[in-house]
Image (tube, rainbow, N blue to C red):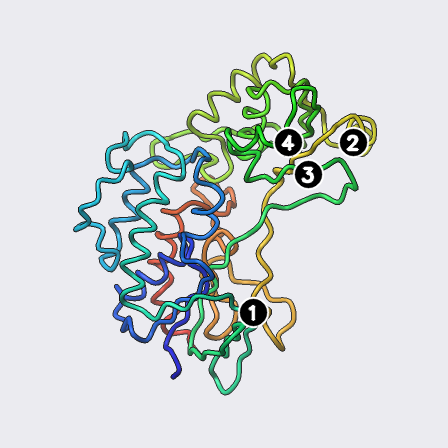
Amino acid sequence: MTYQWAIIGAGPAGIAAVGELIDQGVNPSSIAWIDPNFTVGDFGALWQNVPSNTKVNLFLKFLNSVDAFEYKTCTENFALNQADPHHTCRLGMMAEPLQWVTEQLKKKVKAIKGTAENLALSERTWKIKLADQTIAASSVVLATGAVPKNLAFAEPAIIPLQDAMDSERIHHHCKPEDTVAVFGSSHSAILVLRNLVESGVRRVINFYRTPLRYAVYLDDLILFDDTGLKGPTAEWAKENVDGTLPANLERVYSNEANIAHQLPQCDKVVYAVGFDRRTLPVIEGMGPLSYIEECGIIAPGLFGLGIAYPEGKYNALGIYEYRVGLWKFMDYLQRIVPIWMKYST
């Protein structure tokens, strides 16, 4: 059987893609959905205890914007439904209803548990190789996510970003006498700095290259919506980074001389310097592929969505930003799916 669509990945972007294709009239039985676990991807597995910079009302908007999700008829009393819609929340509050939505969608489409290892285009059909089978699809959506970047320093020992951003798991990696380096000045980096400072480690050294940016809510747009600090993270940064540094926190400009001098003094390091697109699945016969940032097209019948393939867009002030966030993925998807449906193999 050749499926009409195959969705690779069951994180938030994959969930959105499956639901929106059904809403657009694609027969659910002609959709193959591939994921090793179907537990909301990294969002559900790694980041549940991390504070979001997205307000609750936008999470609810995501859940209610697709009829195929059936969330409007859900009787589960999720904590997200009771949260203040104008405040942010931890990501786990969104992971719970997303898992419920996943189970509803799995009943409608062909859910295949496994990892897509290889893609090849032949006779206008994509062949998708898994460990134990090969399936075919006319069109494929890559919603495969991204992994934190690491820098090429030989030492010290790396604390995984997902653990450093978790106020509970960070304690498994640090001792009170440690000196910990943190590279970066993004939302992720500030969360890490706060966790380390409040954990009571002896010294935290933040290597940064750019001043902090804060999201500002204007009448018709949000300045630095995709790159600026928001919510409690922004408030903490204003007081403790751009305000009075805590006794165990210091910041140094990230240049070669400072790194050579300061990094050897550190016992551990956290890299909060962005994410790299996952390389799987391998795409045969096409060499390195990019995507069109305005519509997610990678190749005929091959499309990308989510944190690995975000929309690039100029805002009203002429600033080019990548739109990252669950509602932004959904808003983007609903505009480009009609294009995808015509740009098939």
Q: Which amino acid, by three-letter code, is at mark 3?
A: Ile
Residue 91, x across and y down, in percent: 40, 39
Q: Which amino acid, by three-letter code, is at mark 1?
A: Glu
Q: Which residue is mark 1?
A: 117
- Label 1 vs label 4, nearer the camera: 1
Labels 3 and 4: the sequence-earlier one: 3
Labels 2 and 3: the sequence-earlier one: 3
Distance between mark 2 and mark 1 Cα atoms:
38 Å
Quarter residue 288 falls in: bottom right
Residue 177, x across and y down, in percent: 70, 19
Q: Which of the image's four quarters has the N terminus? A: bottom left
Q: Which residue is mark 4?
A: 210
Distance between mark 2 and mark 4 Cα atoms:
16 Å
Residue 288 lies, with reference to residue 136, above or below; the image says above
Q: Secondary structure at mark 1?
A: loop
Residue 159, x across and y down, in percent: 64, 37
Distance between mark 2 and mark 3 Cα atoms:
15 Å
**178 or 30: which is nearer to us?**
178
Q: Which amino acid, by three-letter code, is at mark 2?
A: Ile
Q: Which residue is mark 3?
A: 158
Say few, some or many: other residues with alpha carbon within 10 Å of mark 1 (under 14 / 14 to 19 / 20 or more): some
Tell whether label 4 touches label 2 (CB within 8 Å). no
Q: Which residue is mark 2?
A: 259
